Image: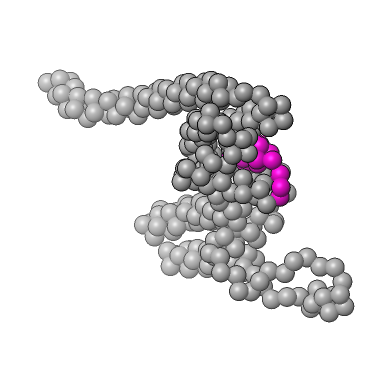
Amino acid sequence: MNELTVALLAGAGIGLGLFFLVRELLPSGPALGPALERLHGKAQAPVRRRDDKRPLIERVGDRVAERVRDWPGVSVPVKNLNLVGDSIGEFFGSKALHFVVGLLLPSFFSLVVTLAGIDLPFFLTGLAGVAAGVGLWFLPDAQLAKRAAQARAEASQAVMAYMELAAMERISSSGAQDTLERPAEVGNGWAFRRIQAALVRARLDRAPAWDALRSIADELDVPAAGDIADIVASAGTDGAAIYSTLRSRAESLADEQAAAEQARANAASESLIVPVTLLSMVLLVFFGFPSVVRIFLV
């Protein structure tokens, strides 16, 4: 088999695989059976709009999510997605893109190597493609977890500031409802906007503001927001004095965040030990090798 034949077969295989992948994931025309059922008024699943203006990768991600979310080992990190503001379609679209890139990279490498005159077994290229695709499939999970951890830390800082503001609002003789609503209007960060939106929904639903904060505690995965809700709820129902309680909880939260920051700094410092050690060894070999060779040759 000459080089041109190998190149043509590899290109045809890659192109055919991409064609079937895109054909499967992109929206298709309605089938005749479901269309006739709709005419007769039978129950049906929601139909995708043909004028969907979302990015292509998000629409593809929705199709991928429908097919793989029930597979063993596949999970949807809903809480992390809500925390960073990404949709399920964006998440699975990114996973699908990474999988395709990992699947195709060994094929391109094999093609280049074959054109250079080195024969590689096809099964080895296929195994490498599957392994790379599966490995890159899980890369967005790690990226999302890192972004969510950073967002969670930012939300904790915002909740601490909100708690301080609520304590100051309470000492000015505000009611329990105002103690939670007015401080939320001061901040303009994304976490404060989430709190504002939850409080607005609670007001429209005629629900207590502290119930909204409990939902925020679950949505942002910041238990301190639930602590504020419990403290202020006690004032709303029992008339408890809560200024000192809010201040002491804010101080303890500040101590927790300082300890967490110190732990992250220590982890970052420890993670640099291995790269710095390897770099030092490479430099030592690079500069010391000529001298060692000269000693043995003399």
Measuring from the top left, give residue 78's x and y in whole percent: 64, 45
Q: In this view of the protein, which residue sits in the foreground, 248 or 117?
A: 248
Measuring from the top left, give residue 252's x and y in whole percent: 52, 20
Identity of the residue furthest to the front in this view: 173
Q: Determine whether 222 is above or below 52 in the image.
A: above
Residue 297 seen in render: no
Q: In this view of the protein, which residue sits in the foreground, 42 or 152?
A: 152
Give the residue at x 47% y 63%.
6
Q: From the viewer's perspective, is 210 left or right of 267?
A: right
Q: From the viewer's perspective, is 32 left or right of 60?
A: right
Task: Name which quarter of the figure residue 207 lies in.
Answer: top right
Residue 10 falls within the magenta-colored stretch: no
Q: In this view of the protein, which residue sits in the foreground, 194 or 176?
A: 176
Q: In this view of the protein, which residue sits in the foreground, 293 or 87?
A: 87
Residue 22 seen in render: yes
What is the magenta segment's predominant secondary structure? Answer: helix
Magenta stretch, residue numbers? 205-220
Give the residue at x 43% y 67%.
4
Task: Name which quarter of the figure residue 281 lies in.
Answer: top left
Give the residue at x 61% y 45%.
199
Measuring from the top left, give residue 162's x and y in whole percent: 51, 35
Q: From the viewer's perspective, is 267 left or right of 75?
A: left
Quadrant including the C terminus: top left
Residue 211 falls within the magenta-colored stretch: yes
